[in-house]
Amino acid sequence: MSERFIRLYELQNNLYSVGSPVIVSAGALLKDTQTNNIIVQLKFQSVSVTPIKALKVGIVAFDIAGKEIEGVDEYQYLDLKIQNGQEFGSNKAIVMPDAVTRSFSVRNITVVLENGNVQDVSMPMTILPKGTLLQSGLKDAEMVKQYKLSVNDKAAYIPQETNDLWMCSCGEWNIGDFCTRCRAKRTVVFSAYDIPALTDKMTSRLVTEQAQREEQQRIAEIERQREAEEEAKCKALEKEKRKKNKKRAKIATAVFAALLLLALWQLWLYPDVVQTAIQYNRAIELMENGDAMSAAITFSTLGDYKDAKEQVYMCWSMLPGERLTIATGNVHTVGVKSNSTVVATKYTGTPDDYDGQCDVAEWKDIVAVSASRCHTIGLKLDGTVVAVGYNGDGQCDVSEWTDIVAVSTGEFHAVGLKSDGTVVATKFTGSPNNYRGQCDVSDWTDIVAVSAGSYHTVGLKSDGTVVATEYTGDSDNYDGQCDVSEWTDIVAISAGWEHTVGLKADGTVVAVGSNKFGQCDVSNWANIVSISAGTCHTVGLKSDGTVVSTQYIDIYEDYSGQCDVNDWTDIVAINAGSNHTVGLKPDGTVISTKYIGWEVFNKGECDVNGWTDIRVPIQ
């Protein structure tokens, strides 16, 4: 879109009139370089408790000198069902009748509500105040942290009120008692911004934290002293033992002197070769005895010795779990190359919104990757895990994991499948509003595959049944994505935002959960060999190398092209993100759906055309 359209003019953001059911969030005048049409795009936010059924808008046009010219008397947004807080209109183009239009304003707005009421918005509209960062008012990072603990981790602004609206600390303008973006309660948002009370709470918290640190240091010192005493005792016993065996050792030394000298001579001449050969033979023995995980770890330490690298991947092919070599987050894509390094798309959004999820250039010895909204995790050949990106909820705390054979990450957590069929999850450290039981997997056993959604986790058992975490959130927000207990004969699983899909042994697909966008309409699929659930869509890889997708129901007018895969061929692996889908071809190249949504949300996630030598997944 950045190449085809030239931006000529922008409205001020967040225009509003008292009592209006909508905010004009943004507006732009664009020139289409292919058709030479001049178009207006507007984005509205509903602030009406009654759903919006339709909206009519009139546009006043001006030439380069500011003289009014022919505009658009009426443009209609029809067949809507816009709830309070939702945005709409950004993908509709209003073609201006005069090609010399160089600026515009909104003449009038009429809103039709679902209950039949018709409301005209008072003109002119005024600009809502901009948000003031919490740091500007609280002046201290610990005070900001205390406010976030009182509200939620999305808090970034000082809350404010203007006429009939209020700005939440997350930056969203609202009209009701709860924020439509972060679900914070209005009374909590404002009452929490009490500097004296925040100061008292912060002081109490810091005192408690200091006491905890001092207690931990005290316990550590006691443990250090105990270990020192134990070490001293062991040294004394060892000294006595050496004294008793001194005479015996002299005799043994004389008998084996020649053999010892010969062995030392060989090790002196070829130390690396001897030790490496011993390790290689040990790894072969482990693999033959069925301990593929230990064998893979041992082979991974041998570098280029003989066929050690090939043997590593042979061992991984014997292990359970699905290992992705292409993975998509909300605004980025990553891929594992054949040399076990990792590539990522270049983030093209604003630096303030970047969390480091693409910083994988230094990774090596990677066998699989998984990506979510703002972070990436990688599974190493030795069964350990690395992570980069946003860690506000603990989703990147994987450095202590070992013996992992498959990984999957959701928006707020990550899970790992161990070689013994158990599952580990990150410890959730974020806002309670974002925890709905997705990390409760410690009692799972006999698992052969895992998949993490935004608020839930599912696991495939060796008998073809499926388990899911128990949803602990508000029942009004539950869409049934964990209702998989009746599934049988399943060979693969994938968890999306609020839905779950399963691939059956006969190549058909089942799905549960939210179907608001058509993401669960998979009942007529056949000959499927792989599945992937995105945020609001699902894709399937067929046995002939083609790809199918659910048909996106564009209720919010935010379709970005993520389902446009019907002409793909010769595909060996797929992965569905939020606004895009990627596919891996047998020659190691990668294709992506073309981004066709609102340009402000395009962060470079589809820019994979130059990728080569991406490894085909090890199953």
Image (spheres, rainbow, N blue to C red):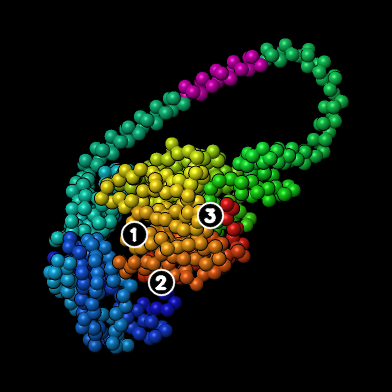
Horizontal side of 227 relative to 142 (left or right) equals right
Label 1 amino acid? Asn
Of the residues tagged 1 and 3, which is closer to the observer?
1
- Eyeballing the image, is 475 above or below 232? below
Q: Which residues are magenta?
A: 221-238
Question: In the rendered image, which residue does mark 1 sit on?
Answer: 515
Q: Is residue 96 visible?
A: yes
**Few, some or many C-alpha atoms within 10 Å of disc 1 (few <14, some 14-19, many ≥20)?**
some
Marks 1 and 3 sit apart, C-alpha to C-alpha, by 26 Å
- Report which residue position mark 3 lands on: 324
Q: Residue furthest right?
A: 258
Q: Tag 2: residue type?
A: Ile
Secondary structure under the numbered disc 2 in the rendered image:
loop
What residue appears at the point 20 percent right and 83 percent down from the top-left corner?
Answer: 73
| Residue 416 appears in the figure | no
Distance, label 1 to label 2, CA atoms, is 22 Å
Which of the two discs, 1 and 3, labels the residue nearer the N terminus?
3
In this picture, is 587 found above or below 108?
Answer: above
Is 444 positioned to the left or the right of 556 in the image?
A: right
User: How far across and down, in percent of the image, does residue 548 sit?
Assistant: 46, 66
Q: Which residue is mark 2?
A: 596
Residue 389 drawn at (x, y percent): 45, 52
